Image (spheres, rainbow, N blue to C red):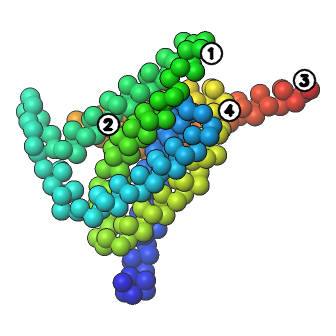
Amino acid sequence: MIELLTSPEAWAALLTLTALEIVLGIDNVIFLSVIVSRVPQAQAKRARQIGLALALVFRILLLSLLVWMIGLTQAVLTLGGMAFSWRDIILIGGGLFLIAKATHEIHTEVEARDDDNEAAPKASAFFWVIVQIIVIDLVFSLDSIITAIGMAQDLAIMIAAVIIACLIMYVSSGPVARFVAEHPTTKMLALAFLVLIGVALVADGFKFHIPRGYIYFAIAFSALVEFFNVLAKRNRKNAVN
């Protein structure tokens, strides 16, 4: 352990892996921000805390099962001449879940329902939000940990990078969630991102890798346009007042 603290290579690996984990965690934060908007404000914070705590627990547990994780890339099913591992199956399932969930949320936003219909499901909404967070945390954790295994050789470095990334996710999730909740157009944009991320996960499961740089550039560009849109609306509102 002392050798790791004094090794430049270990510190370089930690910084690189932490940056990658933060980038991979963006998807998780977007999903959390959208999903917690379906519950009351008091429960939203608790749901975020539970979701991020589970994300950290899942990542550390999966890291502790390195041998099993490596085995996940071994083919367990062959269809039409294409071999699928458990990792592929989980990514496909998680991607389809994201696409279905985001599409449902877009439909809910577009088809504006009256207040009575909105209030009815809120008693059990918190439970279902937690269930959905658990499912998607498992999917994102798998992608994150397989990246960690490929990037670093020492378990301590991997765990440290995951913990740092989860702490940053925790700090950023609150402001992101509030911003999404306060700006309906931003929420619609976030849902569109979830569809895009879901498609990328399904593509990965079918061995067609979409470079994440393209996806994150599209997200960053759209977010910048939306930022100027929100700023313009605020300036117009101030001018009227």
Q: Nearer the viewer, mark 3 or mark 2?
A: 2
Query: Residue 133: image x %, image y %?
Result: 42, 41
Q: Nearer the viewer, mark 4 or mark 1?
A: 1
Please, what is the three-letter code of the amino acid marked with disc 2?
Gly
Counting residues from the start of the chain, the first of labels 1 and 2 encountered is 2
Please tell me the numbered disc located at residue 240: 3
Residue of label 1: 115
Residue of label 2: 94
Query: Taking 209 as reference, is 155 above or below it?
Result: below
Counting residues from the start of the chain, the first of labels 3 and 4 encountered is 4
Residue at 52% x, 50% y is: 49
Structural distance between the alpha carbons of marks 4 and 1:
18 Å
Counting residues from the start of the chain, the first of labels 3 and 1 encountered is 1
Tag 1 and tag 2, C-beta contact below 8 Å: no
Please state if 156 lies on the left or on the right of 15 as rendered. left
Please state if 112 lies on the left or on the right of 60 as rendered. right
Q: Nearer the viewer, mark 3 or mark 1?
A: 1
